[in-house]
Amino acid sequence: MNYFSSDFKLGILGGGQLGKMLLFDTRKFDIQTYVLDPSDQAPCKIACDQFFKGDLMDFETVYNFGKKVDVLTFEIELVNLDALVKLEKEGLKVYPSPKTLKLIQNKGIQKDFYIKHTIPTANYKRFDDLKSLVVSILDSKTKLPFVWKCTEFGYDGNGVKVIRHISDLDNLANVECIAEEMVPFKNELAVIVCRNPSGEIKTYPVVEMEFHPEANQVEYVICPARINDKVAEKARAIALNVSEKFNHVGLLAVEMFQTEDDEILVNEVAPRPHNSGHYSIEASYTSQFENHLRAILDLPLGNTDSKVAGIMVNLVGSAGFSGDVIYENIEKILGWNGVTPHIYGKKQTRPFRKMGHVTIVNEDINEARRIAEEVKNTIRVISGQ
Ligand code: ADP
């Protein structure tokens, strides 16, 4: 198929920042794109060829959108699965496949998949609702502490809570959930795998998520991770295995824990470009977005190696500010070597809303880390009032 400067249309479900960054590459290749998103102010709106406003969870809306395009992909997992299944049955290429998405959308089903395929993961139990979890604790069948996770619709840690006392369950939604063993990890790692329908498969280097010591928020994504080669090799091999077992097409971000004794446990996966791969736009030979595009169009995959060390700092709305956004001190950080801000295009900031990120590249990873900290301490996402 001729994708380039042609009538071919790539459909993207979701018009957020991941879609917007993917559109840089569709523009680079002159590939036409249609985007569906519920918000009139979606970041993708300015860069796609045609924008459609609509509910991503609505069967008819997703199905009708799918009928307009030649290949369909998504940048968010919360989309109507039945519509994707029907579109695929009718011959549309949907990548990643709805079968994979079904295994991933529910954390309980995802964990069962790891067990079935002997992929190392933390022990867990599944519960239909909070009440049955409480009964299991009272019967001493589930031991405290553990990590509670709702199986669906959680994101960025909002469906996850450490339970040390039974009273920690108060105020949690009475929904399907899992209780997972607490992992005493020394590092959180991630590996992005890309795979095309022909089976060509590549991994990006292992990255490390460095957390704020108190806020428990990812502060820096660091590539390459500061771990020894043996652990890195193990992490990449496990990620490759996970992608193959899912028979995945497109990008798969595999989040993992490195335990105190250097075991690797898979935490969860995301079937799309991922926050942990944003550094690749500046630091890699081929960005994760370009490789996602290459993979879903069954083109040869690009080189996933890094040219330099890369560190990413998320730009989230500062606490106490809501309204028209201002990026305080952005000019200052633009004056520093190897510093590139990405502004997603959300006009309104709210506390902790993901508004952008900054990539820092440098030949020397320690120097990159030093500059990243200065960036973090300098730029602030605030509002006008
Ligand atoms: P989300 O899908 O919202 O990102 P995760 O499952 O990745 O949720 O969990 C969010 C964070 O909670 C993880 O990045 C990690 O810091 C912590 N966490 C998750 N599971 C465990 C666990 N079993 N043991 C210890 N910490 C965990």
Image (cartoon, rainbow, N blue to C red):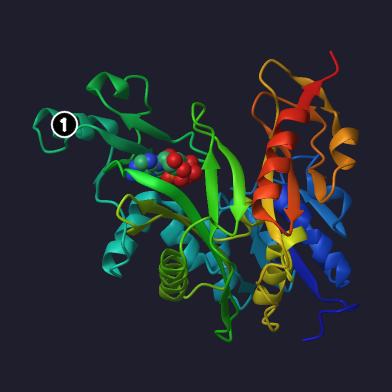
Question: Percent from the top left, x then y, of residue 268?
Answer: 43, 54
Question: Percent from the top left, x then y, of residue 210?
Answer: 54, 43
Amino acid type at mark 1: Ile
Q: How many marks?
A: 1
Decide if ligand 1 comes within 8 Å of the CB at mark 1: no
Residue 296 in view here: yes
Residue under circle 1? 137
Rendered position, 295 above or below 278? below
Rendered position, 187 above or below 348? below
Quadrant of ligand 1 in image: top left
Local SS, label 1: helix
Query: Left or right: 183 with respect to 341?
Result: left
Of 164 and 189, the residue lying toward us: 189
Query: Left or right: 246 with respect to 83?
Result: left
Few, some or many C-alpha atoms within 10 Å of disc 1 (few <14, some 14-19, many ≥20)?
Answer: some
Q: Residue at x 69, y 56 (%)?
A: 364
The image quadrant where one finds the C terminus is top right
Q: Residue at x 65, y 75 (%)?
A: 295
Residue 153 in view here: no
Rendered position, 199 above or below 325? below
The image quadrant where one finds the N terminus is bottom right
Of 7 and 383, the residue lying toward us: 383
Query: Left or right: 229 with respect to 1?
Result: left
Question: Percent from the top left, x then y, of residue 214?
Answer: 49, 26
Question: Percent from the top left, x then y, of residue 297?
Answer: 70, 78
Q: Residue furthest top?
A: 385
- Which image quadrant for residue 198? bottom right
- Which image quadrant for residue 40? top right
